[in-house]
Amino acid sequence: MSTSIDLKAATRTFLAQTEGHLATYLEGCVHCGACADACHFYTASGDPRHTPAYKLFPIAKAHRNHKFPFGWFGFARPIGERDLREWEELLFDTCTMCGRCTMICPMGIDIAAIVAGARRAFVAAGLGPADLLAAADSSRDHGSPLGVTADKLRDRIAWIADDNDVTIPLDQAKADVLLTLSSVETMKYPQSVAAMAKLLNHAGVSWTLSTKGYEATNFGYLAGKGAIAKTMVERVVAAAESVGAKTVVIPECGHAYGVMRWSAAAMLGRPLPFQVLHISEFLAHLMREGKLQLTPFDEPITYHDPCQVSRRGGATADAREVLGGFARGFREMTPTGDENWCCGGGGGVQAIGRAANLRYQVFKLKMDQVEKSGAKTMVSACSNCRLTMDESKAHWQWPGGIDSLVEIVADHLVEAPRKTQ
Amino acid sequence: MPIMTVIYALLLYGAAAVFGLGVSYRVLTYARTPAPLKIPTMPAPVTRTGVVFRVAREVALFESLFKSSKWTWIFAVMFHLGLLLEVVRHLRYFIQPIWFWTVLVQPFGVYGGVVMVVGLLGLLGRRVLIARVRYISQPSDYLMLLLLLGIGLSGLAIKFLDHTDIVSFKAFVLGLLYFDWQPLPDSPLLLAHLSMVAALLIAFPFSKLLHAPGVFFSPTRNQVDDARERRHLAPWAAQLEGAGDEV
Ligand code: HEM
Ligand code: SF4
Ligand code: SF4
């Protein structure tokens, strides 16, 4: 990464986006500051620079300068290197694109979408955290941000299947359902992969994994690299088409679901030839069809809503429906559902090393929520949330439990042996 | 014809033209640029009727603001409602004979002015006193509040301190409308009031006042949750996603 900043490229990329609907947002922000309290970064740090509206300043400035050249009262200066340097950290490290600010903004300004757009301009200028950008490049070159190539996937799946005594179909010629994986699961939480396989097998689903398109995460999207974002989507679509899948199931990964649900068709330039369901939605479907036989579970647990699944995805009820089927000790934290606090690591922030301390601070909100709910364990349906929270938990040596939805459900399948805690 | 009348007539024509053309241009742009993605804020309505109600609640009740900040909400409602009452009240200068319902509004109109000024002072106080709001405040944010305060205070002063000759002022306004200029009453307060109104009209299409039309075009609020059912078509967006920023 060069140290010189390509100001022109940044300006061009900003303006390419403000030609579109972002103009409505940028011109509509009344600087009322109501959004600050909605943002976990501001709430955890108290730093006024973490106010969501403040994160929009560089792109708004570029827009004002371009649109209103006379600038009323001379306030419309062009963006400079200093702007970019100051805001680089704010745009990458202090926005998880959780969408919480949009819920309370009187103008409904989609800060997360603008941050995603602004990130592209920073990348075009030669800025952006090296580790996040490397994760995107690795996705393009090796198939996954953590370097899970197709060969590695085969090995890994064979090992997981063997170790957990479960059948994991890979590269079946035909299947109704294509399951995708987050490499966080493949590499760090292999039990989750085994759990999903157990559940799908138990319910008698015709499914497969595919070496053509297995990676659900989309670091191209998170890092502001549009071309890579599109490639990642195309791989999954090609895999689904080749096995004739009617449904693509997104694993426990929030942004993967967000990208597939909202943006994939637009990136692809045509309608998706399949239905996209998050694993929690898919399990809820199976439950409704009576295909999951579960034994009751009495431990006090609560559910952490992954932002992209609940607030941004609309699948808020599904995980609760699944848990409601057997978890008798389930209770909500406050706030919950669409208003739940973010884990602090979404939007690629998990992959940014220098943001670790901020993430720890944010996690304090979560520890407090869980403690007040009286739950011993918090279940999440996003492995990125889980990883973020596991790291923060280790930092604070917090005693609370963190688990995954699919693992808890798989552990309580009627024929499965109970996990000894 | 007094020189002041000519100057103010031209100023007001100019301001009205900038306002009308500028706002129409911005609104046309908003209406023509499709949102690239489906991204309503959840839980989103699944029908168009649901969306109409959602936007109506935002505009009439400031629903989201109410959820987030009660104090800002109170001041914001005082200011906007006061402003609305005042605008309706001012219609009497533009129409002859006066409509029945604008007559009904007249007595409340005065309170409208006071309420508006109190609301504005609250908003200004908030901007100055709360550190995080101060941090995101730009010069134009203060100027806008001061301008509106100036309009409100000069208006109240005309009403309570230095009652202007309303009859000849109305003649002046109607004269502008029918291109039959009549002399403008000679009152410094009135001139100040009118100058600031002209400044507001001119600033409108170039400032955050665009939030008024903009709120109707906010994709997170005016979209139906049917991303799975119908593909949202925005060709330029697909292009942008793919190539606009090759790195
Ligand atoms: C559809 C009509 C409108 C709606 C729904 C609307 C809504 C809002 C909301 C929700 C806020 C944020 C709360 C606040 O800070 O006060 C706001 C702020 C503001 N509005 Fe409006 N508004 C409308 C029309 C107008 C008009 C016509 C004007 C002036 C001519 C105006 C002037 C302002 C100003 C100056 C602020 C910023 C206040 C501050 O600095 O704190 N609004 N508006
Ligand atoms: S709440 Fe919305 S309008 Fe208010 S400052 Fe934040 S982004 Fe701007
Ligand atoms: S999207 Fe979330 S993280 Fe980003 S500014 Fe808004 S509240 Fe903060």
Image (cartoon, coloured by chain):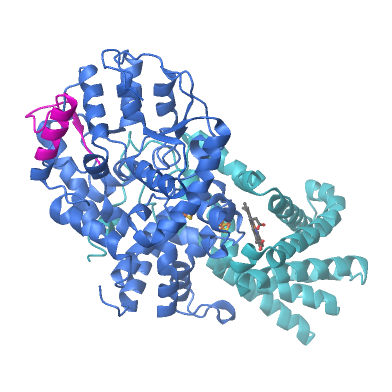
For the image shown, how many numbered marks are present on the structure?
0
Write down which quadrant ligand 1 falls in: bottom right
Left or right: where A305 falls relative to B157:
left
Residue B47: x and y, percent?
46, 33
Above/below status of A13 relative to A392: below
Query: In the depicted view, which residue is nearer to us: B102 or A154?
Result: A154
Q: Residue at x 55, y 70 (%)?
A: B206
Residue A241: quadrant of the picture: top left
Q: Residue at x 23, y 33 (%)?
A: A193
Residue A308: x and y, percent?
39, 42
Query: In the depicted view, which residue is nearer to us: A189 or A171?
Result: A189
Query: In the depicted view, which residue is nearer to us: A274 or B107?
Result: A274
Q: Which residues are magenta?
A: A154-182
Residue A214: quadrant of the picture: top left
Above/below status of A159 relative to B6: above
Left or right: where A34 falls relative to B191:
left
Q: Residue B21, can we see it? A: no
Q: Residue at x 37, y 55 (%)?
A: A349
Above/below status of A360 relative to A68: above
Residue farthest bottom in this picture: B3
Q: Residue A95, can we see it? A: yes
Residue A206: quadrant of the picture: top left
Q: Is residue B193 magenta?
A: no
- Which shade is chain A? blue
Q: Residue at x 26, y 13 (%)?
A: A415
In the picture, one chain is cyan; tell me its letter. B
Quadrant in which the C terminus of chain B is drawn: bottom left
Quadrant in which the N terminus of chain B is drawn: bottom right
Q: Is residue A161 magenta?
A: yes
Residue A324: x and y, percent?
44, 20
